Amino acid sequence: MTPGRTIPFYCDFISPYTWLALMQSERFAERQGIRWEMRPVVYAALLDAHGLVGPAETPAKRRYTFHDVVRCAAELGLGISGPPEHPFRSLEALRTLYLFRSGPSAPRLAVRLADAAWGQGRSLTDPVVLRDVVVSVGLDASSLAERIADPAVKNGLREMTEEAIAASVFGVPTFVHEGELFWGHDRMDALARRLSGATPAPAGLGEKILARPRGADRKRTPTTKR
C-alpha cells in the first residue's frame, strides 16, 4: 500500500511507552496507509512547560509504570530488558533521530533506537550503540558524534520541542491527526478509528465541556511537588 496521510509522531526514547508504540508503528503504518513523520522532542521540557512530573519522579508511580510496561510488552509479545539506568540522558539519541528525520529510514531508525534501550538493554548514552543502530538501518554513521553535536542539530531539536509545546503536546508518545492529539501507545487504536472515519472528531462536544466553569481545584500544600 502506498502511504497517504502523514502523521506526526512525537517521541522521546526515555519513555517506555514510546518504545511500545514504536514496536507497533511499522505494522500500523502499513495497515492504515499512512507515513510517520518522526518528531523527536525532549520529554523533560514538555513536563516543565506544562507543570507536570514524569512517572519516574514519583516513587509509587515509578514502580507501577515499570510493572505496567512489562505487562504491556507481554501482551504485545515483546521481549523487554530495560535500559541500564532510568531516567537516562536521551539527548544524543534524540539528536541522532533529528539528524536523519527527513529520510525514509527515520521511522525504522526510531524503532531501532528505542528497542536498543528497552528491548536489548543497551545504553543510548553510549556513542558506539548509537553508531551501531544508525549502521543497522543503512545510514551513514561517519563522524556521528560530531554531526549530532552541531549547533544546527541541537537548536533544531530545541525548536521541535518548542513547537510541540505550542501544539499542546504534554507527553510521549503523541500522534496528531488534523490537529487532534492522541497520547499514549494505547491510543493507537483510537487513531486508527479516526483515520478510517469510524469515530467523529470530538472537538465540538469537547469544547462545550471545556467551556463549563471549574467547580473545584486541588489545594497545593508546601509539600506538594511539581
Image: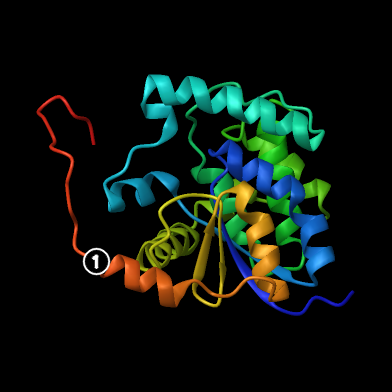
At x 70%, y 78%, the residue is 5
Q: Residue furthest right?
A: 1
At x 60%, y 28%, the residue is 68
Q: Quadrant of the C terminus?
A: top left
Badge count: 1
The reply to whether residue 142 is in sight is no
| Residue 26 x/y as whole percent | 79, 56
Q: Nearer the viewer, residue 41 or 30?
A: 30
> Quarter of the image holding residue 57?
top left
Q: Nearer the viewer, residue 19 or 94?
A: 19
Q: 214 left or right of 123? A: left
Q: Nearer the viewer, residue 44 or 23?
A: 23
At x 59%, y 22%, the residue is 67
At x 76%, y 80%, the residue is 4
Q: Residue furthest left?
A: 222
> From the viewer's perspective, is residue 213 above or below residue 19?
below
Amino acid under label 1? Arg
Q: For mark 1, what is the residue?
A: 212
> From the viewer's perspective, is residue 161 above or below residue 144?
below
- The secondary element bearing badge 1 is classed as loop
| Residue 105 x/y as whole percent | 77, 61
Q: Quadrant of the N terminus?
A: bottom right
| Residue 196 x/y as whole percent | 73, 74
